Image (spheres, rainbow, N blue to C red):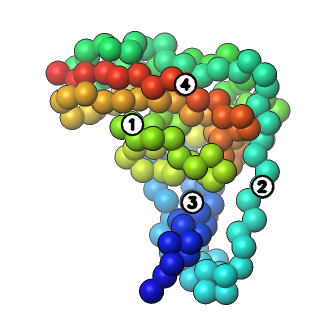
Amino acid sequence: MKSAGASSKIAGIAVLLSISACGEHEAEPAAAGESSTDVAAIVAAEQPVALPPRTASPVGATVFFITPADGDTASNPVTIEFGLEGMNVVAAGVDEVHSGHHHLLVDTDPPDMGLPIPADENHIHFGDASTSTALTLEPGEHTLRLLLGDHLHIPHNPPIMSDTITIIIE
């Protein structure tokens, strides 16, 4: 039976293996066995996974929602526009000073800031450098938060993250 640490290590490795696949809005995490890297062997040998240091963020950089506003009621598809000040938006994989790309967190808490941001229905990647989307959500209340990731999808240090907003979908 795998320990929680081993499962976490597998998840981290799978995310790292999927980084280059992130493109337009959604990237699926790589499953174990989908890469030439033998994830099971790495975990079994308990070899450490070395992550690069987090990219520094400039003082005063902010990410925010242009639309919708906190408390808004909307209908599907809801248009979401991202704002960024003090940094540049670039595509995933582009390593430029004071830059990154958007990740939209839907109905979830912030991820581990030392690891690449997961890619699933709650962590939507915009590795194509887009700054808006049209999203279809189930009717009801939803929380949204923006988190900027560096060229490797790892949050900056300190993180560039918006306040959480709540919207209601009719």
**Disc 4 element:** loop
Look at 58% across and 49% down and name the residue there: 112
Look at 51% across and 23% down and name the residue there: 163
Give x and y (percent) for residue 16: 63, 60
Give x and y (percent) for residue 71: 32, 14
The residue indicated by pointer 1 is 106
Using the numbered discs, state the Cα–Cα distance from disc 1 to disc 2 in whole angstroms: 26 Å
Using the numbered discs, state the Cα–Cα distance from disc 4 to disc 1 in whole angstroms: 12 Å
Q: Viewer-nearest of labels 1 and 3?
A: 1
The residue indicated by pointer 4 is 162
Picture disc at residue 15: 3
Amino acid type, callout 1: Val
Look at 61% across and 51% down and name the residue there: 116
Among numbered discs 1 and 3, the one appearing first in the sequence: 3
Using the numbered discs, state the Cα–Cα distance from disc 2 to disc 3 in whole angstroms: 14 Å
Amino acid type, callout 2: Pro
Amino acid type, callout 3: Val
Give x and y (percent) for residue 66: 49, 13
The residue indicated by pointer 2 is 52
**Disc 2 element:** loop
Dot 3 crowding, Cα within 10 Å, few <14, some 14–19, many 20+ = many
Tags 3 and 4 touching, CB below 8 Å = no
Among numbered discs 1 and 2, the one appearing first in the sequence: 2
